[in-house]
Image: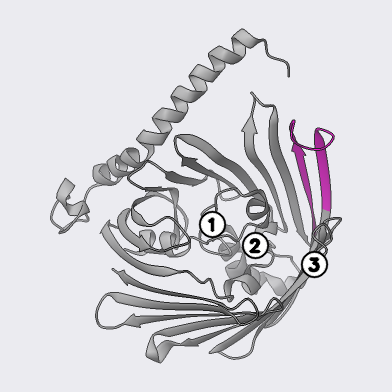
Amino acid sequence: MGNVLAASSGVDPSRNTVAASLGLPEPAILQPIDSASTAATAEGTSVAKDGTLENPGTVEELHKKCKDIQAMTFEGAKIMLNKGLSNHFQVSHTINMSTTVPSGYRFGATYVGTKQYSPTEAFPVLLGDIDPSGNLNANVIHQFSSRLRCKFASQIQESKMVATQITTDYRGNDFTASITLGNPSIFTNSGVIVGQYLQSVTQRVALGAELAYQYGPNVPGRQIAIVSAVGRYSNGDSVWSGSLGPSGLHLCYYQKASDQLQIGVEVETSLRMQESVATIAYQIDLPKADLVFRGSVDSNWHISGVLEKRLQPLPFSFALSGRMNHVKNNFRLGCGLMIG
Amino acid sequence: MVLSDGVKERLGVVVSAVQTVFHWGFVPMVLYLGFSKGAEPGMPPLTILSLLWQ
């Protein structure tokens, strides 16, 4: 089951800052620091002594370590049945009951091809997720060569393509360049183009830039471009990452305190909204108890926690999620069971 | 890029047709690819019912 499971567990919700801010669908990002860079890391450890730089990963994954340990809460009850039919094929049935997100049944299918550039990943990957009224999320990821990878994500709601995103990543030896095309339309003459570049400057420092260009009749002045600078400093078990642009500042710090504990701090300032949010998050792994706990507190007084426990020896895992705000006086509880 | 109304209309038909095919064809295509790859050696062959239970 290696491939399919690796592919589906690596699917990473809402990590794409650009996609999130544009309301685009969450692209399925496979294993964090991907195949190309895993290979690069493997050889990098031996080559690093010669002073050669490694591939820094993509700009999209810049804050990933810090974001990953934050609690992703959900609301209501969720039952998910995953069924691996072969190493290349997996289907899932999900029933979701909630007051905030649409309730009901969803069917998902994942196909993983046979083209392999690293032992953990195979391409192409096709992920489809559909509900009975025909709302579809589709993701296609393909690695054309060891350096070039394309991602396509699309979301169809009520027979309308509400969001589309095409991303191409090129990974050089010490840099990654990406270009993303969002919601292109030749009829309304609108769309978003995002270019990103990240370069390893030293073995610890990576610097880059992002240019987002949006055009269309609804955009003030028909077009707008925003440049931001991004950077990351990693030192052993800690990582500083930041992005700075005219729209705001985003700063993350991640520290691996021990094998069990990881801590992350994030400050996000938006000049347009005139607000700042700071978050402190931690993740505790207890492999002996098959348990992962993620907790976070932010400056809007949201307290969140998600507990995930695998019920060995059964093929079940159980998730409990809670999110509370004393100031606004609301509370959301979620519980989920994943079979398979 | 300026398109005349007639061209836009015809392009619209093509785009919406492609979109409909993609909409209703994507998940069946994934299932077809999965089934055509078949079961692992030594495992019982896949049938439509294996989507629901073994």
Q: Which mark is residue A165?
A: none
Q: Which amino acid lies under the numbered mark 1 shown in the image of this protein?
A: Ile
Q: Which tag, 1 or 2, sits closer to the chain's start?
A: 1
Q: Name the residue tied to disc 2.
A: A61
Residue A87: within the magenta? no
Q: Which amino acid lies under the numbered mark 3 shown in the image of this protein?
A: Glu
Q: Residue furthest front?
A: A329
Magenta residues, dominant SS class:
strand
- The image quadrant that residue B31 belongs to is top left
Q: Which amino acid lies under the numbered mark 2 shown in the image of this protein?
A: Glu
- Does residue A203 appear anywhere in the picture? no
Position of residue A337 in the picture relative to residue A116 (left or right): left
Residue at coordinates 29% horizontally, 46% vertically from top-left? B34
Q: Position of residue A159 (x, y in %)?
A: 44, 34
Question: Of helix, strand and loop, which one carries label 1?
Answer: loop
**Chain letter of the residue carrying label 2:** A
Question: Of helix, strand and loop, which one carries label 3?
Answer: strand
Q: Do labels 1 and 3 share a chain?
A: yes
- Does residue B2 appear anywhere in the picture? yes
Position of residue A216 in the picture relative to residue B22 (left or right): right
Q: What is the span of residues highlighted in magenta in the rendered image?
A: A208-227
Mark 1 or mark 3, whichever is nearer to me: 3
Q: Do the residues labelled 1 and 3 touch (CB within 8 Å)?
A: no
Position of residue A239 in the picture relative to residue A76 (left or right): right
